[in-house]
Image (cartoon, helix red, strand yellow):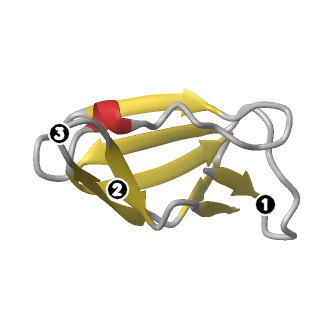
Amino acid sequence: MEVVDAQGTTIRDATVTATNVDTGRTITSTTGERGVTTAVNEDIGSGSVRLVATAGSKVSAPAEVAWTCDDCHCHPEPSTVRLQLHP
């Protein structure tokens, strides 16, 4: 998952919150140097997951990812998400 500003520049230290809509389970992570976090993983569980990024007073529009789990692993669809911060 990547976080960018309105110009498309990646944002370091943005907070990404992922919430499983069905279970309420939440994972919060912070983007690294390249504006990317991989901390939202299969621990979130299957179902619809709502993603939101914040950095200071800027916030992204929410995005949704569908996590599907089999006996061994969970897979997000889409597999990559870009959250754009707005003032």
Q: Position of residue 28 (x, y in %)?
A: 45, 30
What quarter of the picture does the C terminus occupy? bottom right
Q: Say whether disc 3 or disc 2 marks the residue closer to the N-terminus.
A: 2
Question: What is the residue that sits farthest to the left in this orientation?
Answer: 22
Which residue in the protein does label 1 denote? 5
Compute the Cα span from label 3 to label 2.
Answer: 23 Å
Label 2: how many residues lie within 10 Å, few (<14), some (14-19) or many (20+)?
A: some
Amino acid under disc 2: Arg
- Name which of mark 1 and mark 2 comes first in the sequence: 1
Q: Element under label 2?
A: strand
The answer to whether residue 12 is left or right of residue 47 is: right
Q: Which of pointers 3 and 2 indicates the residue nearer the eye?
A: 3
Indicate which label's residue lies in the foreground, 1 or 2: 2
**Residue 6's quadrant in the figure?**
bottom right
Residue indicated by mark 2: 50
Q: Report the mark closest to the observer, 3 or 1.
A: 3
Q: Is residue 53 above or below residue 13?
A: below
Q: Where in the figure is residue 52, as x and y percent of width and height?
A: 48, 52
Q: Which residue is mark 3?
A: 71
* Residue 23: x %, y % from top left: 11, 41
Q: Position of residue 4 (x, y in %)?
A: 76, 58
Going from the N terminus, do you reach mark 3 or mark 1 first? 1
Q: Residue at x 30, y 44 (%)?
A: 19
